[in-house]
Amino acid sequence: MKGEPAERLDPRAITLWRIAGTLNMLPLLVGACFVGWALLRFGEGSFFFGVLPVLAVVVLAGVVVGVAPGMRWRRWRYEIRPDEVDLQRGILWISRTLVPLARIQHVDTRQGPLQRRFGLSTVIFYTAAGPNQIPELSTPVAAEARDRIAELTREQDEL
């Protein structure tokens, strides 16, 4: 196998993932507060058992918002080669995907509201096996990557 892919995602991805993680943790925190309140109000348990659900969610949120985005960014790499797209991602389990350009059917970019706010986009390329993506690239870099994959795919078709 070739060496590790050379390209990294945009560093603004870390901030975006932290914001998304915070938004995802809010309903869980509200639920934990409700459970804690119910345990204190109606249960015979101590104050500790009433606060425990909230503390558990706060610790989980610390990992999801504070630790995971940086680790995820450090691991996420990609490289667009003349014959394949090489993707590496994961935090604890590292996944490596090699997508032959000859298998790519079409490619496009996507940009959600938070991505738009940070000037980021996701490149998605489709094969018969399903979609693959390179998330959180700056919008100009994503456009270049999309166009490069499309051009290399056309060249593969001509061979």
Image (tube, rainbow, N blue to C red):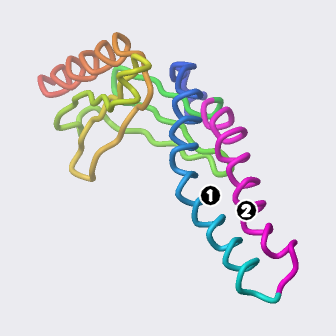
Q: From the viewer's perspective, is 76 left or right of 53? A: left
Residue at mark 2: 54
Say the numbered circle drawn on residue 17. Answer: none
Taking depth in this image into account, of 27 and 65 the one nearest to the observer is 27
* Snapshot quadrant of residue 65: top right
**What's the amino acid at mark 2?**
Val
Crowding at mark 1 (Cα within 10 Å: few <14, some 14-19, many 20+): many
* Left or right, residue 42 beside residue 113: right
**In magenta stretch: residue 53:** yes
Q: Secondary structure at mark 1?
A: helix
The kind of residue tagged 1 is Leu
Give the secondary structure at mark 2: helix
Give the extent of the magenta segment: 45-73
Q: Quadrant of residue 90?
A: top right
The reply to whether dot 1 and dot 2 touch (C-beta < 8 Å) is yes
Which residue is pictured at 27% across the width and 30% down the height?
110
**Disc 1/disc 2 C-alpha distance (Å):** 7 Å
In the rendering, at what x and y percent does residue 115 appear? 39, 26
